Amino acid sequence: VSIFIFHFSANILVRNSEMKGKRVISKREMSKADQCTFLSYQSVAYGTLGDVAGDVSSIEGADLVATPIAAGGHLAKGATDAAMIAMDCSSIPFDEIKQQLNQRFNEVDKKLQKGAEALENVTELAEKTYSSVEKMRVEMREGFNHVIATIENANTKQIITGINQIIQYFNDERENINNRQKEDYVAKLQEPASGNFLLYLRKSRTSEDGSLHSLLFKIINQELAIPNNAADNNAIRALFALFYGTQTFISIMFYLVKQYSYLADYHYQNGNLAEFNSNFDHMKTVFQDFKFTLIGINTSNSKPLVNTVLSIIEDVKNKRFIRNLRSNLYQKIIKSTKSLLDLREKITKMDLPIIEDTPKSSVLINFREKSSSVPRIETPILKWTPGTVVKYAIQYEQDGKYSKISKWSNPITVQRLANPYITIDKDRRNRLVFRQFGNEKPELISILDSSQNEFRDIHRDLYNAAQMPYKETALGICRKLIDSGAQVGASFEMGRKSIHASATAGNDDVARLLLAKNNGLLNVPDKNGYTPLHIASERKNNDFVKFLLEKGADVNVRTFANELTPLHLAARQDFTIIVKTLMEKRGIDVNAKERAGFTPLHLSITSNSRAARTLINETPAGINIKSNSGLTPLHLAVLQNNLSAAKVLVKSNKKVKLNEMDNNGMTPLHYASMLGNLEFVKYFTSEQGIDVNAKTKVKNWTPLHLAILFKKFDVAQSLLQVRNIDISTRADQAITPLHLAAATGNSQIVKTILNSGAVVDQETANGFTALHLAIMNPNTETPQFLIAKGANINAKTNDGSTPLHFAAALGKTNIFQLLMDKGANIKAENLINQMPIHEAVVNGHLAIVKMLIEQDSSLMNAKNMRDEYPFYLAAEKRYKDVFNYLESKGADVNEKNNDGNTLLHLFSINGEVEVVQFLIQNGADFRLRNKERKSFFDLAVEFGHAGIVGYAIEENKVDLQEPYRGKTILYHAICDSVKYDRIEVVRYFVETLNEDQCSPLQEAAAYAHLDLVKYFVQERGINPTAFNNDNQVSPLCIAIVGAPCGFVKSCDTPERLDVVEYLVDKTPDINKECDTQQSTPVSSAVYGNKVSILNYLIRNGADPNKKVRGDPPLFIAAMIGQYDIVKSLVEQHKIDVNTRNKEQFTPLHAAASNDHIDVVKYLIQKGADVNAKGDENLKPIDLAGEKSKAYLRSLGRRFFRNESPSKSFEIDKFNAIMPEVSMSGKVSHDSNFIQHISSGTRSKSNFNSAKNKMYAENSHVRSIDVNGALLLLDFMVRVFSNRKMNYAASISGIKSRSNSEAQAEALILTERFEHLLNALIADQSIDSLDFSNVHSRIYKAIINGNPNGISEMLCSYAKEYSELDPEKIEKLLQEFETLTFTKSSEIQINEKFSHALFETCGLNRPTNVLQIK
């Protein structure tokens, strides 16, 4: 493992090996950015930037303040390991922070006036959704870039390239527009059609060639995003591109809605009502069109994009091979799928918060007076001049939702009178009425509730007159309008009234008139909470402020959102005169805090600071008071680089706290040091009481640490000159200034610190010295200086890494040479036994590899904890230059390890297709087999790596038709892919090569692989009830019997039951025979000892009494000793314990004859008749084995009726121990299950032949029955003694075998013989032996009643294997001991010899023989 992965992995030294010689290997190709990401050292996500921006938004120059605050937060949250600083992963990204903050403030600057937006709710909805989608896109952007760089399929690449071009243009042009000021921003959005960005984006949803929609549907319709196997990387990349493209499609939708909403409101506020309507329509159309394309709207035949993409992802998730997929891209898709699901649901339920109806322009205009008491107003007055045209329009509003604006009414020419009466239609909604004179800007003149339909057009004129610049004229007009009925409390844009208008202009006489009519207007707020006093204070209308205060205006009143008082506004604007006026008001709260906790003094810290001086020197303002984030006014003075304000604070009589900390633990000196404000630093350090060694609360950083960390080296040098500076102070992780100086590569600071007495080898908490860190930094001067100053060149970090390790990993050739020249230990090992040679190889630094090998060639064989040596690592990394160099020095690409695995085998196991290709291209022998006789191709099949399988076949690295284990390589490859549940490899064989040998459905059923069974039945259309050609057995019976556990009860698993249930559902008749030997599913469950399957079958209609060749299931279970089956049949399914077979024998006869004493006792306990007579009047005791006979006799005469002396009944000993079905407990790793299963799990009426217990298997030979052992014993005796054993006495009593019985015995003996040869002879030539022919000859010998000829026949196959050395003989004897329980110690070898085959087999042998007892 590279040092950069290993060192920072928390307490993880190495991944455990899965098996000896077969280890999972992680890729090590990591750029510096990758390393930083891996170490979690990349810049923290700036999710808090918006909060920071909001916190300081009330401050002048907020962007300057926000950046260092955000950086301080980053510093508090970020890692503190010195190594990541040296790797430059921790550089605080000031520029990035500033850019993001500027964007935030830019958005604030472009924001329209709050309260004057008709579509504010639309904008908010679009912005919220857009932001959430953008967050998803940012998280996946890196993955999409990887897709662009690695996609291989030409067609897919062309499509994804097109998608990328659209995305890039969207990103770039959006950024270009966002950086513009408001007016330029609007102009850019409204460019002519040919270059209009918004119109271009709207085409994204069209089907025209090259649009984003058409490109995404090319991926969908061509099924490019559906992988065929786990190695189909192109499909996974296409799926990622499809997902990312869909995210972008949604982002474009809400970006368009947001921009059209903005444009509509912009024109609304500017009185361009026609433009408002136009953009209102654009916004509405975009939303509806894109929503239809994304999710469909009540349309059954549509193909909505989001639904389609989610459906594809679900299909991919359900593919069997996907669970083994190792793909970061796929994991990112799955991780983000829930967000897309949530988004779909949100969009489905989403409606724009608008009113769909457009009002009619039915307006009645009447200039005649309604009452003689109301004076008429004659023209000219304000804009009412004779000959001017006036017209009106209407807009609906309800619960914050707005409609389009109606068409203008028919224009009326103004003549002698002004201010007509207006009548409009009644409606349940509020109606906003607009007026336009000629071509001037329209203005809102009235808001009518549902009960109103008539008003006089006079109130807006009062508002307009109140803000006229000429006070006397304004007062006269206002008095006239009020006398004529104008309402002083009427509201207009932003909820402002005439009193607000008078405050804007400073018309205190008008205000006096208004308040005389309604004194409640004194503190009336607009929609944003601004009172007349707020407006006058912010407009610097001092006389108006004094007037309002005299009238009793609330001096501490606050705005709604930011909670600003009038004093906050005046201080922020540096209006000293307003500050002084407000301070004269008794009860003013000079320390009032706005929403972020800033006082007026905080906001007054601007460039001129006149208001600040006033507040500090003339008011009780607190100079140490903190904001919500802990900032004092002195902090802000530093952050705004306002030294004069800082001096005023420090020199005041209020005793400013120089060392006060904010919430991040930062003092003003910390910020000055971090920002590099040298003047501030010098000023602070000259002040008494300054704590130059103050530490932050969280990470214990001092100002000196921050100055070095932020590379403000002039500040650092200045701090180092301070008399009481602590040069050895330690931050978290024991990081000192020396460590940071070395890590940041500043040799001058290093020299100054060392010259001041610092210890050169002081260590961080992770054991890093300055030398370690200096080597990791690009600067080469610092490590040379440290070495010259006596730094320990063999110092070890906590993980055991020395400076040489880091120099080797980073390719620092000169430093490496210097360290070697100084005597550094080139064999130093870290905790995972990694040496510098491993670091050099894994990072591809050939020059350092050469230096090491030339120094000590034994390093060629140096192994780390994972047994990885340089040549192995060079192959894995595919560094050809390093690989070739090591080969030239003696490395062998075909060298085998203890398991016989070469590099090609190991990387095939791990699925490293690129490495496999690299090795073969560079001389690896793909024909070599390991000790298990497996090639790299076999291992790729076994471990499910379809990419390597496909490569081997397509590049002719394997001959699929080559004879192998009696079949072909292809046959066994298909079998093994099914056996090991490798569906991606299965698909490759079945779909790509169109091969389906090996009865794959039966094989999948045997191993209980439900997904594969479904695949073969549902996707490949294989008949689930058909018998296979080889053994004439149905999938259901094979699934019930099972592999590899056969009769073992533990094989009765839920997974197997799932397969059985599936196949039963596909089987019309559950009682139908499922092989050619009349077996049924129930009898198969009995033979297989599958209790849960048996119970399921019977519950679902299977007949528990159906006989198989005359034997009922309970009889069969008793005969072969299946106690649990017997118990289940009797107790759960109420089967008669005295049921009889066709020869009238009972289950008790069967159990007793095979001496199954537990079953015998149970049956008798449940009422079995001990005197029941079967064929030839035989009772159970007549047939009983030794234990059963003794037990039956012990029961006494009370159980026996008319018992006569037992007639002599001699059981054929050879036959009595022959199992009914010779099936192994497990299936060989080398052979498929179907080759091992017999013609079925049968019962036979002659129950004298009963199932015997299987002997345990060892690593070479499975359990074997006794008659098989006897035959093999005969073979071995012939081998070693040249004598034949005569089994005639035993064999003479053998009754004829049925076809299935003979097949079963022949299969077992063939398998045992194959294993004996494999155990003795490690030679590939054995693969050419046709074991199917061996089986055929053994079968004929058994069926013809000539078992004595079997040994001679086996001998004939052994002639070509004549070399047996003593070691092989010993191994054979051990095998023999396993087979027969004959102790090898009892076999005397009188003489060692090299040729020990027997004359009977026609082979020469020495005269000395083995004596076998």
Image (spheres, helix red, strand yellow):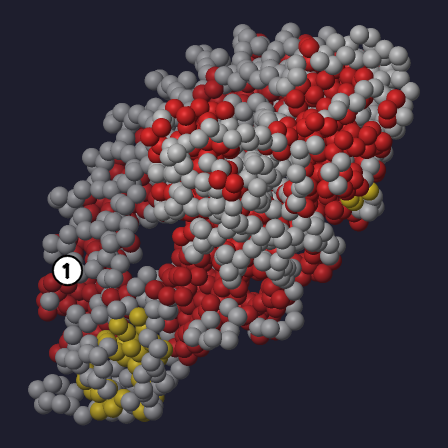
The amino acid on which the numbered mark 1 sits, given as a three-letter code, is: Leu
Q: Residues within 10 Å of mark 1 (few under 14, many from 20)?
A: many
Residue occupying image coordinates x 73% and y 28%: 1288
Give how far across and how far down residue 141 sits, in percent. Answer: 57, 50
Residue 86 in sight in this render: no
Residue occupying image coordinates x 9% and y 90%: 372
Of the pair 626 and 209, the residue shown nearer to us: 209
Residue occupying image coordinates x 72% and y 42%: 1343
Of the pair 400 and 214, the residue shown nearer to us: 214
Indicate whether 1148 appears above or below 1070. above
Q: Is residue 692 left or right of residue 599?
A: right
Q: Is residue 454 left or right of residue 794?
A: left
Q: Residue furthest left?
A: 373
Of the pair 1396 and 1231, the residue shown nearer to us: 1396
Residue beneath label 1, please? 522
Indicate whether 1345 appears above or below 546. above
Q: Quadrant of residue 18?
A: top right
Give how far across and how far down residue 126 sits, in percent. Answer: 41, 62
Q: Quadrant of residue 745?
A: top right
Q: Quadrant of residue 1157?
A: top left
Q: Quadrant of the C terminus?
A: top right
